[in-house]
Image (cartoon, coloured by chain):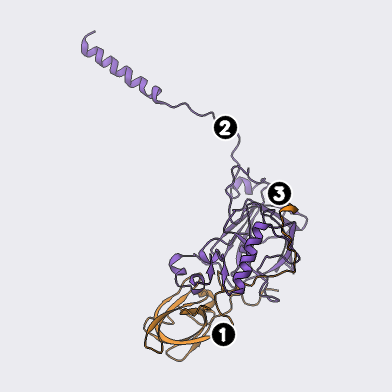
Amino acid sequence: MKALLVGFAGAVVILTAGASFAHHSAAGIDQTRTVTIVGVLKEFKWANPHSWMDIDVADDKGETKVWSVEMTSPTYLARAGWKSNTVKPGDKVTVTVRPLRSGDPGGLFVSITLPDGRVLGQAPAAPRAPSQ
Amino acid sequence: MKTHQLVLALAVALLISTPAMAQAPRPAAPPAEPEPLGALARANIAKPRPKPPFDLTGTWFIDQRNSQNTWRFGPTGPFKLTPEAQVHYDAAKKAQAEGKVYRDDIGQCWPAGLPIIMTRVWPIAMIQVPTAVYMVSGFMNSLRTVYLDGRPHTDPDVVVPSFNGESIGRWEGDTLVVDTKYFVNDHHWIDSGIPASDQLHIVERMKLVNNGNTLEIEYTMADPKGWEGEWKVTKRWNRVEDMDIAEVSCLPDLNQHMPSTQSKENVR
């Protein structure tokens, strides 16, 4: 078997391609910065394994683009105060996301300012303090 | 015999003989062996067995208090990959350097498979009966069964390869030793850029510590198609008392709204 093996025996390199909160890798997301968008909620999905929002956002030229905002599961959203009817289509919302590296309209949800001024985030995808 | 009587007699003879003529030769019956009992058969559960040293029944979540990376199963020391696996590893490193994602099959709804299914994202429920431990992950409701009823591994010519493989457990003192093999050969990853093959073999040594509140598993993993020798790592799970496992499905129309699975940063 050794003859089949290449001569790579370097230090351990853990590829950090995935964030631990999602069901998939999030390497396409720029985790170093946030972007805040203001727009009109087009659709909100309350579902496992992820909730999501589509938001119509007008740019400086007046052109509207749909931003897809990826959220965690309802379990962890509920722990941050969310309900399935917290937002509805037509609501004017301000949403902060970690954007796609590509610059395409979309990103991972960080927080939302609701029409009534409340600010909601999402709980970390981990249980509360473990049993001891 | 009149003509109509002769016709009737011939017709009756034909009707009687037709089924026998049409019948295909029957294959030889297999040797008569009793059907093995299912793990939940009452007669199987009722068989006398020593009392198990612990009960895994509960909901568990990987301990991430000291590191967010404890869910990963990549090597923890120097390692050598096969040329075939090295191609994937190098491609994943290149993708990462470019801010891209390499072969994120999980994001495209492929099952995570063992070993990652034990640690990925959400807690895992375990139900122990005398003949088996049933594990249902909050991650896509993946089912894993560890058989404890003394059965051997399935005939390799009969078994259906799977992402979680076939797990056979046995008690050794205070430890549950679980031997798992018969995995699929594609779309299954040990970690980013490290593929699992149909030669993957995993041995888990499971113990309950911390007054039964912590599950500790020592992993020994070998895959001659992927790397040289054995990789060992020990992980811990804590009991989760305030959460249930919900129905979770990876759906194409949901994925359309997931920027991280749809972006051009995904290298397929």
Badge 3 crowding class, 10 Å Cα cut-off, few under 14, some 14 to 19, many 20 or more, is few
Quick one: quadrant of the N terminus of chain B? top left
**Type of the residue with mark 3:** Arg
Q: Secondary structure at mark 2?
A: loop
Image hue for chain B: purple
How far separated are the C-alphas under marks 1 and 2?
A: 67 Å
Figure chain in orange: A
Measured as percent of width and height from the top left, residue B6 is found at 25, 12
Q: Chain of mark 1?
A: A
Of the image marks 2 and 3, the number of the one nearer the N terminus: 2
Which percent across, then down, holds residue B22? 39, 25
Q: Nearer the viewer, mark 2 or mark 3?
A: 2
Residue at position x 28%, y 14% in the image: B9
Chain at tag 2: B
The tag on residue A33 is 1
Residue B129 vertical placement versus A62 (above, below):
above
Q: Quadrant of residue B129?
A: bottom right
Looking at the rendered structure, the kind of residue marked 2 is Pro
Residue furthest right in the image: B173
**Residue under pointer 3:** B49
What is the spatial separation of the Cα atoms under label 1 and label 3, in whole angstroms?
Answer: 58 Å
* Circle 3 SS class: loop
Q: Which residue is rendered at x = 75% and y = 64% of the image? A: A9
Residue B260, placed above or below residue A117: above
> At label 1, which amino acid type do we have?
Arg
Residue B86 pos. (x, y %): 66, 61
Element carrying mark 1:
loop
Q: CA distance from mark 2 to mark 3?
A: 31 Å
* Labels 1 and 3 in the same subunit: no
List the residue tagged with mark 2: B30
* Pointer 3 chain: B
Q: Is residue B35 visible?
A: yes
